[in-house]
Image: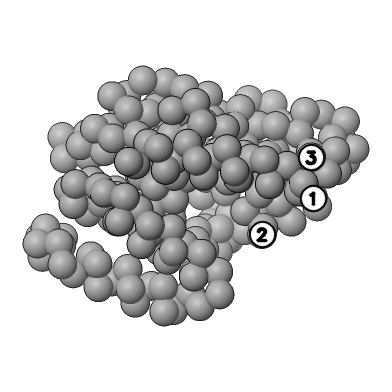
Amino acid sequence: MKRVFDLMISIAGLTIGSVVLIPAMIAIWLDDFCSPLFIAERLGLGGVPFRMVKLRSMRVVPAKEKVLSTAANDTRITRIGRLVRALKLDELTQLWNVLRGEMSLVGPRPQVPRDVARYTEEEKELLKIRPGITDLASIVFADEGKILRGASDPDTRYDAVIRPWKSRLALVYVRRHPSLLTDLRIIWLTILSAVNRQYALDRVSRLVRKDGSVQNW
């Protein structure tokens, strides 16, 4: 049922979303005449690599300048990119990966090979299910850019402050034996967080407190 639901929503989302995605892609291309898509290597189910599709929100930079984590004040973000990020359009394109079966609507966010290589034995449980577009951590850290704002080394701050808690929240989902009902609740909270973030965070807190492992954090 989870996979059938993923297929239905990804097809509908890409069809309806094309009304916004196509103009956005044109606007991104006109800004610097570079590809409007950003193809990122991520590791999915079982640690198998795949190419995640996102709308490009940053200027094209040499590999030596690349920083994995992005602060809200990152100078690499383009004018169009700020709007893309604000409206979460860069996440909408990932419905293509859901359609292909590489991702799910709900699941732990897919990680770059560098981060997966540093997984603890406990974190390796995250590779047991398909990664997703949203999860509990996506709701809690929706303001990730603000947390990283002003950091001299965004990657270091991400590893110290954000990454450990993202993994813990993702493990809560994995260990609850994901169901369609659980996915629907998380999707609803993701949408709700855009309107009433505090209420959504309170609901996430209730879900997490029901998991016994939280007492060991």
Amino acid type for the residue under numbered disc 2: Ala
Residue at 38% from the left image edge and 72% from the top image edge: 201
Q: What secondary structure is marked by label 1? A: helix
Q: Which mark is residue 80?
A: 1
Q: Earlier in the sequence, mark 1 or mark 3?
A: 3
Q: Nearer the viewer, mark 3 or mark 2?
A: 3
How far across and down, in percent of the image, does residue 13 sit? 60, 45
Depth check, mark 1 against mark 3: the one in front is 3
Of residue 45 and residue 118, the one placed in the foreground of this image is 45
User: How many residues crowd around disc 3 within 10 Å: few (fewer than 14), some, or many (20 or more)?
Assistant: few
- The quadrant of the rendering that contains the N terminus is top left
Q: Earlier in the sequence, mark 1 or mark 2?
A: 1
Three-letter code for the amino acid on which mark 1 is drawn: Ile
Residue toward you, 74 or 138: 138
Residue 217 pos. (x, y %) = 16, 60
Which residue has dot 3 on it? 22
Q: Nearer the viewer, residue 72 or 107?
A: 107
| Amino acid type, residue under disc 3 in the picture | Ile
Q: Which mark is residue 86?
A: 2
